Image (cartoon, helix red, strand yellow):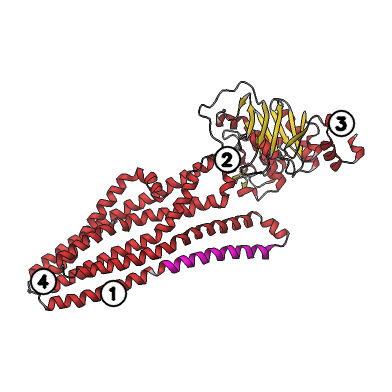
């Protein structure tokens, strides 16, 4: 998964990668040449008392060092640009894919996990790219080149290199095999921590209202402890690498000095050669250490890449049509033909055999007990879900064949849980129509019975709105959401229990103001209060996902026991007449 992700999103940066490799190659060659120059200064200059040779070789060392610095700086520059661009592109790809998801896929992953995958997980893979540009390109070149140069100085000590590298390799592989499942567990626990934190921030008012602060603090403490524990377990495994590498490097240095000293004493090598061999050994082991640092990041990056690919590889269950229909002849007619819907793995369908029509200029209300499938039914019209069987048609065309842009421009949805974005009143209303004028915004607010409280807000249309609309009341959020839909002027209005937070007087005024505004549109209202839907042209009564009755308020009172039961639960017997 990691290699697939890197191949896909590093392809546009091929020129940068070539530049990084060439610059790192130049910097490494310079670093490998320095010990040889140093050995010549010792053997040809210091040992022979040749001052001009010392000066000339010293100047050459300074020139090589300057070249190394320039190459290294260039590699870091291109590496940073490549890593940052890679991260940007992957985040954009995840965001784009999530936008294409239906509600089913979003619920499958969960919002906290999607946030973690688009932030923390991408950051881990991005860090891997950066470390690769800075170290791993250099490490193999230095390792191979260091071995060649060390053997060029003295073959008799080569067995020390083989032993040191073999010992390090066995230790590193053993530790990484133990660490990989721990990295996977850590990412899962980060998801859990994000989920708990998001729930607590969103439900802060409920927590305080029920005095559940100690309980929620305990939940957060447990989730936080789980992440800390996983991080410590990973850290304990990985941090053993550094002292092990240091121990091997120190032992190797002692071995070189011991056995090299014997060879110098026997006249088989010179002091400068011994010094160069020791430096090359350190470079080889340093390259192994750089690879070790990389391998510390690689297992976690592998886990993160798998999680990222899970999102990128998930296709929406709501598939765009291969040949979308872009032309519609009518103006908002909605038809459901024997529609059924079931969630994957569910024992029973949420909706079964739903059939009814909504014509332009009429209002259809949907009522039923909690869990009867009202919201699911409404979500099928804008194609937030696809029906399991049957057909949902808008303007006589199955929504699965309609161009998504045409469908979404035709339908205006006010969801059951109204959501406002951080910004201003005006910016939220213009989600419905970015070109709307201030006069159109005020008109929509007036119809939605929101003008009075917006006028009292500091800044009015430019008044700030917090994320989620938390700085306004539930009823105000509902009215602003209704105004947002009115600004759009769609052919089909879907009000999913959008009047529940309004008092009876405001509810009545709003419904009266809506009538002339929606006179030519098809209107579908999901309601809990009979008073809200009693004057609808037709009322659809749902019970356990099935239609129990369709008709006007008066006809249902005479023919539908389920509707009568709902009415009796809200009104006294004498109010039913």
As drawn, the label of residue 43 is: 4
> Of marks 1 and 2, which one's residue comes earlier in the chain?
2
Q: Which residue is mark 1?
A: 250
Q: Residue furthest front?
A: 347
Cβ atoms at labels 1 and 4 below 8 Å apart: no
Alpha carbon separation for disc pair 2 and 3: 40 Å
> Of marks 2 and 3, which one's residue comes earlier in the chain?
2
Q: Which residue is mark 3?
A: 558
- Number of labels in the image equals 4
Cβ atoms at labels 2 and 3 below 8 Å apart: no
Residue 392: % across, % down? 64, 30
Question: Which secondary structure class fits the magenta region best?
Answer: helix
Disc 2 secondary structure class: loop
**Occupied quadrant, residue 385:** top right
| Residue beneath the point at 57% across and 40% down | 102
As drawn, the label of residue 102 is: 2
**Occupied quadrant, residue 240:** bottom left
Question: In this rendering, would 431 be left or right of 559?
Answer: left
Alpha carbon separation for disc pair 4 and 2: 74 Å
Segment tinted magenta in the rendering: 211-237
Disc 4 secondary structure class: helix
Nearest to the observer: residue 153 or residue 215: 153
Disc 3 secondary structure class: helix
Alpha carbon separation for disc pair 1 and 4: 25 Å
**Occupied quadrant, residue 396:** top right
């Amino acid at each position: 998964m990691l290699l697939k992700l890197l191949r896909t999103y590093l392809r546009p940066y091929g020129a940068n990668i070539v530049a990084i490799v060439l610059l790192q190659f130049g910097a490494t060659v310079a670093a490998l040449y320095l010990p040889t120059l140093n050995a010549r200064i010792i053997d040809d200059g210091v040992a022979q008392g040749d001052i001009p040779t010392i000066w000339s070789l010293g100047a050459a060392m300074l020139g090589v060092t300057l070249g190394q610095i320039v190459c290294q700086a260039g590699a870091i520059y291109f590496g940073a640009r490549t890593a940052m661009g890679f991260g940007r592109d992957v985040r954009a790809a995840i965001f784009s894919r999530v936008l294409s998801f239906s509600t089913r896929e979003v619920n499958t992953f969960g919002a906290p996990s999607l946030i973690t995958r688009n932030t923390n997980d991408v950051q881990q893979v991005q860090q891997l790219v950066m470390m690769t540009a800075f170290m791993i390109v250099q490490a193999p070149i230095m390792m191979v080149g260091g071995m060649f140069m060390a053997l060029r100085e003295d073959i008799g000590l080569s067995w020390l290199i083989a032993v040191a590298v073999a010992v390090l390799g066995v230790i590193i592989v053993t530790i990484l095999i133990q660490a990989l499942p721990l990295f996977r567990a850590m990412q899962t626990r980060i998801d859990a921590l994000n989920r708990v934190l998001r729930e607590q921030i969103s439900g802060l008012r409920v927590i305080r209202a029920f005095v559940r602060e100690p309980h929620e603090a305990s939940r957060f403490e447990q989730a936080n402890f789980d992440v800390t524990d996983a991080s410590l377990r990973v850290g304990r495994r990985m941090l053993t690498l550094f002292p092990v590498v240091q121990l091997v490097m120190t032992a190797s240095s002692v071995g070189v000095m011991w056995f090299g000293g014997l060879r110098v004493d026997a006249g088989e090598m010179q002091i400068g050669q011994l010094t160069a061999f020791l430096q090359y050994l350190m470079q080889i082991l340093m390259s192994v250490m750089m690879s070790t640092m990389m391998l510390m990041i690689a297992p976690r990056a592998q886990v993160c890449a798998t999680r990222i690919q899970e999102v990128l590889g998930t296709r929406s269950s709501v598939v765009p049509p291969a040949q979308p229909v872009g032309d519609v002849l009518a103006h908002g007619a909605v038809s459901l033909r024997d529609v059924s819907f079931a969630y994957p793995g569910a024992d029973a369908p949420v909706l079964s055999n739903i059939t009814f029509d909504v014509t332009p200029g009429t209002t259809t209300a949907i009522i039923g007990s909690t869990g009867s499938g009202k919201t699911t039914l409404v979500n099928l019209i804008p194609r937030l879900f696809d029906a399991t069987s049957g057909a949902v048609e808008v303007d006589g065309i199955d929504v699965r064949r309609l161009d998504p842009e045409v469908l979404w421009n035709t339908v205006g949805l006010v969801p059951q849980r109204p959501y406002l974005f951080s910004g201003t009143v005006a910016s939220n209303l213009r989600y419905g129509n970015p070109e709307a004028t201030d006069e159109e915004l005020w008109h929509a607010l007036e119809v939605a019975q929101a003008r009075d409280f917006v006028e009292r807000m500091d800044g009015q249309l430019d008044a700030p709105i917090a994320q989620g609309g938390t700085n306004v009341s539930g009823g105000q959020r509902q009215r602003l959401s209704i105004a947002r839909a009115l600004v759009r002027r769609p052919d089909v209005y879907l009000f999913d229990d959008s009047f529940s937070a309004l008092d009876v007087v405001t509810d009545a005024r709003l419904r009266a103001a809506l009538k002339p505004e929606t006179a030519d549109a098809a209107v579908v209202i999901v309601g809990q209060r009979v008073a809200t839907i009693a004057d609808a042209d037709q009322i659809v009564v749902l019970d356990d996902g099935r239609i129990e009755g369709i008709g006007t308020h008066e006809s249902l009172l005479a023919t539908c026991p389920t509707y009568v039961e709902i009415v009796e639960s809200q009104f006294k017997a004498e109010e039913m007449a």
